[in-house]
Amino acid sequence: MDSPEKVYETDALIAEDINAYLDRHQHKSMLRFITCGSVDDGKSTLIGRLLYDSRMIFEDQLASLEADSKKLGTQGQEIDFALLVDGLAAEREQGITIDVAYRFFATEKRKFIVADTPGHEQYTRNMVTGASTADLAIILIDARQGILTQTRRHSYLAHLLGIKHLVVAVNKMDLVGYDQQTYDSIIAEYAKFGEDIGIESFTAIPISGLAGDNIARRSENMPWYDGPSLVEHLETVEVAVTANQQKPFRMAVQWVNRPNLDFRGFSGQIASGSVKPGDSIRVLPSGKTSTVKAIVTADGELDMAVAGQSVTLTLKDEIDCSRGDVIATADDPPQVADQFESTLVWMDEDGLLPGRSYWMKTGSQMVSVTVQPPKYQINVNNMDQLAAKTLELNDIGVVEISTDRPIVFEPYADNRDLGGYILIDKISNATVAAGMLHFCLRRSQNVHWQDVDIDREAHALQKRQEPRVVWFTGLSGSGKS
């Protein structure tokens, strides 16, 4: 993947000063991305090629891969890179991906975690799981097949889940003779579809995962393409953590840390923004305010912490703050509400039961929620809004939901941690849906509990009544009623 010179420099550094190499590796940025698309578009093969080219395979693994390729592979006597990712027996027998597989690899500039997601419609819920934490999505398209239904579905889901960076990789260009016209027609069709669903921009790359064209370096077989290789693009794209650092401070409390009588801190991962000692904060939903006293970690106290870091905050004031609460900047806090409009992706074999109570988990908050009948269901092929009474497996719809108590939230488009949630069946404890909050309903903001000073004496004076108690007693059947 890297040039021979870079590989040599890295090997020399490992041999001479392993600590310096590890220190350099530790401070590389991390990009999480997924591969998605229709069945047999080459997602697993692409990841296998990335692992192979980045030298993330040991010699014994390579020997096993070569043996498995001859016995179970789909490339004849050649190496089947998909077997590096598809490890389940059922996946190898059928030549498909069933479950999400996560793999790690690194280049000279950056570290990566990639999720290989299934292409079958039956396993769309697994794709949603992998996409929920991704910064980038590679939408693979078979150059022979063009854009299929699952291509559209996965593209819409990636956009819906807030993935900012999309790469449209037209794969298997070697099977169409590296024809530029085929590539251009596919990209033109995808651009029209992307415009219809709100995708403002994407990066298009013609590749061959099996042959390695435009993967680690630019291919000589496609001189008409003058853009970056796939790895070059992955190494330079902005990661979400960097973008989140520019937003207001938000941290969901995951644990109240009380190791002894003299220490009380609030632990969690910072979702957005930054914080430092002396900052004014607000705890929601209670609304109590205080000031950050210290930022504590296992390695000592910090002068500042930013999005992506897991820390413990101590406050100057003893205020009530529990697991599920959100600590935010005092002058720009998130909203608190109990009724919302939301997009729902149904992921269970049993359909949605409107009016039934489910568990809703968003961040570290867990509440009971009721889902109303869908306002409409979305047709992923043409984005039509269809009438629906319920949602079945893999259906996507817009619904209104109400929680049993107010929760802290932000629109999913602004904050994934406070705007995304899952629904859990209260009986089976299975995750049945994933949702994205749009906004709170106005009626929920128009209802306010008011303090009243009317006691029994004031009520009696207002009605000019003197309260008395009359007690009718006697044996059963004596005529009290």
Image (cartoon, rainbow, N blue to C red):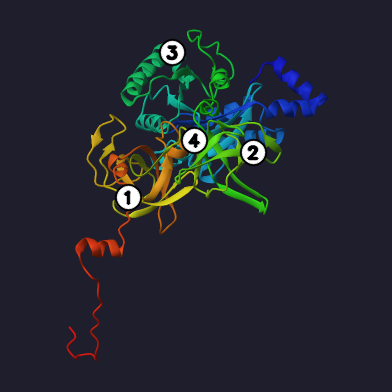
Say which label, 2 or 4, has the lower sequence index: 2
Three-letter residue code for mark 4: Ala
Q: Which mark is residue 294?
A: 2
The residue sitting at 28% across, 30% down in the picture is 383
Q: Tell me the residue that label 1 is attached to.
A: 450
Residue 340 x/y as whole percent: 33, 42
Residue 373 x/y as whole percent: 26, 47
Q: Which quadrant is home to the N terminus?
A: top right
Q: Give the class, few, some or many, for how many residues have Cα within 10 Å of label 2's Cα (few <14, many ≥20).
A: many
Say which label, 4 or 3, has the lower sequence index: 3
Residue 406 x/y as whole percent: 39, 47
Three-letter residue code for mark 2: Ala
Say which label, 1 or 4, has the lower sequence index: 4
Give the spatial CA distance, label 2 vs label 4: 17 Å
Give the spatial CA distance, label 2 vs label 3: 60 Å
Three-letter residue code for mark 3: Asp
Give the spatial CA distance, label 3 vs label 1: 71 Å
Asked whether disc 2 touches disc 3, contact meaning CB atoms under 8 Å apart, the reply is no
Which corner quadrant of the image does residue 376 belong to? top left
Q: Which mark is residue 179?
A: 3
Q: Tell me the residue that label 4 is attached to.
A: 330
